[in-house]
Image (cartoon, helix red, strand yellow):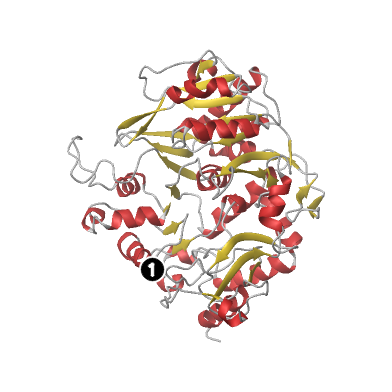
Amino acid sequence: MPKEDNKMESILTENRKFDPVKFNTEFVKSGMTFKEYHTLYKKSIDDMEGFWGEQAQSLDWFKPYDKVWESTDLFPGKWFVGGKLNVAYNCLDRHVKAGKGDKIAIIWEADEPGHAKKFTYSELLKEVSKVANGMRKLGLKKGDRVTIWLPMIPELAIIMLACARIGVIHSIVFGGFSKEAVKDRIEDSDSRLLFTSDETVRAGKFYPKMADVAEMIDDVPTIEHVIVVKRTGNEVPHTKKDIWYHDFIDGVSEQCEPEHMDSEDTLFILYTSGTTGKPKGVNHTTAGYILYTSYTHRVVFNYQEDDVWYCTADIGWITGHSYIVYGPLANGATSLMFESVPTYPDVDDREFPFSIDGYRFWDIVERHKVTHFYTAPTAIRALMRYGEAPVNKHDISSLKVLGTVGEPINPEAWTWYHRVIGKSKCPIVDTYWQTETGGFIMTPIASATPTKPGSCCLPFLGIKPIIFDLEGEEVTEADEGGYFCMAQPWPGMLRDVWRDTERFKSTYLERYPGYYTISNQFDYGMNTPEMVLDAMMMATTGS
């Protein structure tokens, strides 16, 4: 077949452009400019180690690192070699010590409308320390694994931070997964402890947790104890390994010395569902991950001290790991987590004595004065069917910036989101990334980047993409897709597949030796990164 007939063509034909500078808001004026992005991007590629070394000063270190990056036989290499730090300390202690202990760290919105709970940084630190001490009391130590299978309740964030505090590696399983999925992940990680709840509450209905655990617990002998959070209080089956969560932390000290972790120590494993074969345990390490998630959160969304951050994802996914818990809390943010779904109660549901118009999202935004809203295109499309009237019944004028995550967003949904939710003044940050990348890799900068509906626009700082066609040649022409790869590592990327380095190599490194393959096929939608950068720079500067 002639090469010309074997091209992977771009199918994106959207040509509208939205420049945040034209919104002329204080939010845009306070953030990075496109010229600054261009300068920083060049520096981040030309001097990778110098750039990330500067950014790493934003973290608190117990021991400074000796070297920013060290090459190994695997593409990611090692980051911040010799450094010692603790992720939970960077998310909690340093903010309390800086006098911000009374600031709200987490706002929890329950499934039941109108039921919310708030944790200050001081309160969260105490709860995390109690759980960490509880695990130490049971004999868990640095490097041990625990599996967490919980709904979107505060204990989920507390437990994962407690693991990070003492160097225990957590493996969180999405609360909606089956008991078989939990069993597989426990077996692969050899977890010693399982955290779960009596039941899950979702859209007013109860779903089993302990009933499922009771059926599979005998098949996972590495589990020594099952710690059970009482969410509903309904009668549920129990096992001989059960300990109620409230008993687990009762009388335990609220002071817990954080473990001094090496920069490359594993922070967590997160299993990808995968398209074929058993799920892969993506291995993320300590320093590079917390630096990358906090830096991307702060820069891309231009997060400021008094903002309220609301990511609608589930913590069971990488989005929740990176942008509900670790990234925002490392930045001292107020982060909102939501247990329910945006359409419960529905517009016509009269069970409750007050109306929220079927739009939990906008009720939450109004009550908590949310400034930064980050959700999935699927949710946006689902809410579009209700029309504009329910949105307009809520005061969502606090919003400064909108974001999307999880899948491509079609131009129709993008423009509805911009016009109806953003009132045509909020930049939209369409982020492209994966479990493996740790954080955003293709994304606009909210205050800087001219955006196009349906396009994730440009590479983030330090990200050097390259696209290969079906024959392995670099794509240099506009409007041609191909295999999306990376020519340069970055701190937040995975280091390996848990206990399966050969699978890591075959999945990500062997298609194009010397490069990291992000995805099998990628419709870049615009041009190659360098061509886009030059074209956008010309468009915004008038040169």
Residue linked to disc 1: 411
Query: Who's the residue at 45% across and 48% down the image?
Result: 309
Q: Quadrant of residue 143?
A: top right
Residue at point 44% right, 57% down? 404
Residue 249 versus residue 480 in the image, above or below: above
Q: How many marks?
A: 1
Which amino acid lies under the numbered mark 1 shown in the image of this protein? Pro
Q: Position of residue 431 (x, y in %)?
A: 50, 60
Residue found at the far front of this picture: 1
Q: Is residue 4 above or below residue 469?
A: below
Residue 171, given in percent of the width and then of the height, sits at 59, 35
The residue nearer to you, when weighing 28 against 268, is 268
Residue depicted at 19% across the width and 40% down the height: 349
Instruction: Confirm whether residue 55 shows in the render.
Output: no
Residue closest to the eye, 326 or 239: 239
**Which x, y percent locates residue 329?**
55, 43
Question: Could you tell me which quadrant the C terminus lies in?
Answer: bottom right
The image quadrant where one finds the N terminus is bottom right
192 left or right, relative to 62: left
Q: Nearer the viewer, residue 148 or 535?
A: 148
Q: As displayed, is residue 332 above or below residue 478? A: above
Q: Residue furthest bottom?
A: 543
Residue 322 seen by the camera: yes
Crowding at dot 1, Cα within 10 Å, few <14 / some 14-19 / many 20+, comes out as some
Quadrant of residue 118 in the image? top left
Q: Is residue 336 left or right of residue 514?
A: left
Q: Position of residue 180 (x, y in %)?
A: 51, 32
The vertical placement of 8 against 353, above or below, is below
- Badge 1 marks a residue whose secondary structure is helix
442 displayed left or right of 49: left
The front one of 102 and 60 is 60
